[in-house]
Amino acid sequence: MKVIRKGQGDPYEAPKHFNCWAMNKLRPDLSQRLQVGVSHFLPNGGAEMSSSPMERAYYVLSGSILVKGKNNEEHALGLDDLIYIAANEERSFQNQGTTPATILVIIVQLD
């Protein structure tokens, strides 16, 4: 078992993210396939359109984000909403609100 306490983790800068502060709570060196982090997006903060070879889930802890995909797909997410992003699926997102948005980020490394 591994316990990561409040305040523990490693700050990191996620590629293609802007106006964002993130904390990696469960790193790849602690788990074989799972990463867990918390990202805080300032108003107008977000991530550029990109994809990843890993599965991802984003769970909104506070605030709201707008997630965009291919073919004009859009999803407005608020408190307690979750979105699953398949491996290699393109997505972008942005905090369009006036307060910071806090997102729990779950990433699964595929074999």
Image: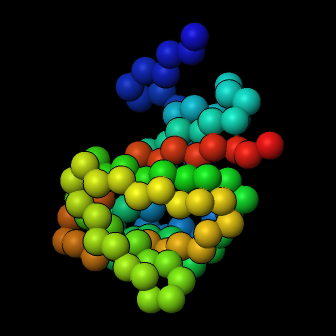
Question: Residue at (44%, 89%) from the top-left corner?
Answer: 72
Q: Residue furthest top?
A: 1
Q: Residue furthest right?
A: 111
Residue 71 in picture, x, y percent from top left: 50, 89
User: In the figure, is residue 102 to the left or right of 11?
Assistant: left
Q: Residue furthest bottom?
A: 72
Residue 29 in picture, x, y percent from top left: 73, 30
Question: Residue at (52%, 34%) from the top-left corner?
Answer: 25
Question: Residue at (50%, 16%) from the top-left corner?
Answer: 3
User: In the figure, is residue 25 to the left or right of 97?
Assistant: right
Question: Residue at (80%, 43%) from the top-left corner?
Answer: 111
Residue 44 in picture, x, y percent from top left: 34, 76
Observer-nearest of 110 and 44: 110
Asked where in the image residue 50 lies, by quadrant, the reply is: bottom right
User: In the figure, is residue 57 to the left or right of 1?
Assistant: left
Observer-nearest of 109 and 65: 109
Which color scheme did the rendering employ for the protein?
rainbow
Residue 56 in picture, x, y percent from top left: 55, 53
Q: Is residue 39 above or below residue 46?
A: above
Q: Is residue 8 above or below residue 14?
A: above
Residue 13 visible within the image: no
Residue 32 visible within the image: yes
Instruction: Count how many numbered circles sit on residues in the image.
Output: 0
Q: Is residue 64 above or below residue 33?
A: below
Q: Which quadrant is home to the N terminus?
A: top right
